[in-house]
Amino acid sequence: GGAAASGMPARRKNRKAEPFVGAAGSLAFHTRSGAAATTDAGSITLQAQRTLHRFCQSFVSRCYGPVMKSLKNEFRRDSVRLEEDDKAIFFRIVWFFFQWWRTYRLEGGGKVAETDDKSAVGQLIFTMDVFTFNLVFTSTDICYDRKKHPDLMQTVALYQEMMQLLRAMYHSQDSTEHVMALGLMDRIFYGPDPIDRLPKLLGRWAPGTYTREYLCDLVELCHTTVSLLETNATHCLEDEGADNSNSKKKGSKANQNSDAIARMNAVAAEFDFPSYFARKIVSPQVVFMYTQLLSQYKTNVPRISDNVVAFFVRLSKVEVSKAVEDDADGEGAEGGEIKLKTSTLEPMLYNIQTIMVLGSILNDSIVKNDPESASLLSFATVVIRHYARAAEENPMIHVESLLKHLSAHRFCEKVTNMYVTDELRMLVERDALLDGMREEEQQEAAEQDDDQEEPIDIGVSVNARRTAAIEAMQAPAPMSDDEGEVEFGVDDTVDIVGAKERIEEKAKKIKVSNKTLTEEEKLKQEERRKKMAELAQKRKEQADVEKAKEGGESGEKEGGEEGSAEENPESPSKRKLGEGEEESAEPQDDAPKTKRIKRAAKQDDSDSEDEDMFGAA
């Protein structure tokens, strides 16, 4: 009021507040009898309807086929005689006769003659070919891109009626019509390049853009398509081998037809219908669209409400992930304490819009007393009960219902399993696996300690002896006895002590290696050590004896030299050196000593080689 008085333009209404446009022009076909904009008005209306019905029967039986064939040829050639709106008029004519045939056949209740029914179907099949379907599918894309929403609504209405007729052909008793239906389904859904437009039409819906009648046509189209695909998939899986056995009893032409049917059935059997429904049809946007249509339950015809309920029930049965206990080997819970439950897409219904609509249905007294709304009332009761039960286990669902979730499958899995995902479960299993590996390593280490205390196998001792023999062959040979006796100098005791220390170190190494040898070999090693010790002691004693002898001889020699010096004062050693003579006394005395030191070092090397030989043996 204030904005209008001040001259300000009125604020534009939010599209989400009014999801449908043109609500005043509701058609009687999608509206309850009491809520329709136009109602039956006496005998004049009934007489007009009967007259129109007779005209439709006469036109379909005599003129429909030739007229539609001629019009399709014009569209096929893209004739210059066609105007811009001719395609929309063509679609409306075909839609009208398709809908008339369906309502007339349903309202007849079996009273219609069989010949009339067959003739009607036979003539309508002229517009049930791949060309007409392609023309409709192309028009949906063009109208959406150019934002021609009225033309798009008319095209979708025709698409919905064509799918209704295709389902009638599939269930027909006429074999020709059934084969034609299989061929159309193979081209639309099962081919390598399917031309189905249903997922795109569902994703393109937006609130505040289309009418309620358009959404009713889209919901009926989805229901018809999904039920037809599910029925055909079940039939192909059950009767996959029946056609092969029956084809052998017929003629050549029948064999060709049966081979084509068998091929189409085999292709249809490979079609993954659950994945098609869960991945291409179901989305949060589609759930919101169905909820908006369900909110018009007071205006909708019961058929529309039943289609919405059927879609939600089918959605609730789609499994996203199975429980761990459902594994075939019963080993699903191995590796951790976390167990995943079987999750479905039912949590997609736990949003604030759907909950409010279902609550209003449960609180509506008219719905409770309406027998046609029994399925709707039962569905609302079950969903609200499941929502309350899930909220008791996970109170966060109340918050989740207010949010928009892009990944519906992941959201359903998280909510069902208390936000325990596969990643968290894999982490727990990895930690449990690492703990198990650590325990196994500790057990193996303990077993190895126990095995070291026990005697080693014969093969190990043989390998040890073989290695020792190879080292002995590679060692240098000891000095022979022909080289003469070893003379020890004054400082040879230090070299002998060092040799003893080396022998003791070698003995320690041998002692360590003997831990892996047998008891019999240990006794042999003890005997060898005793022999080595005795040999070293003998050599040490011999060195002491030689040293003592050398000391005595040097004393006697010095005494003799002193006596001779006193008796011969003019000995040659006392004479003065002449010119050109050198003092060679010191080199003559040092030469024997240097020779003895070299021989002692060479003898030490031979001792160490003997020790290596004993160790190798």
Image (cartoon, rainbow, N blue to C red):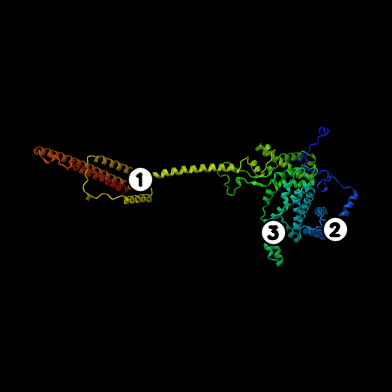
Can residue 99 be seen here? The reply is no
Q: In which quarter of the image is residue 355?
A: top right
Which of the two discs, 2 and 3, sits closer to the camera? Answer: 2
| Distance in Å between CA atoms under marks 2 and 1 | 111 Å
Q: Name the residue under label 2.
A: 59
The amino acid type found where label 3 is placed reads Met
What is the number of the mark on residue 513? 1
Tag 2's secondary structure? Answer: helix
Q: Which residue lies furthest to the bottom in this view?
A: 251
Q: Name the residue under label 3.
A: 264
Crowd around label 3: few <14 · some 14–19 · many ≥20 (10 Å): many
The amino acid type found where label 1 is placed reads Ser
Quadrant location, the N terminus:
top right
**Percent from the top left, x then y, of residue 514?**
34, 45
**Percent from the top left, x then y, of residue 268?**
68, 56
**Percent from the top left, x then y, of residue 175?**
75, 61
Can residue 416 be seen here? The reply is yes
**Percent from the top left, x then y, of residue 66?**
82, 61
* Front in this rendered view, residue 73 or 576: 576
The amino acid type found where label 2 is placed reads Phe
| Distance in Å between CA atoms under marks 3 and 1 | 79 Å
| Distance in Å between CA atoms under marks 2 and 3 | 35 Å
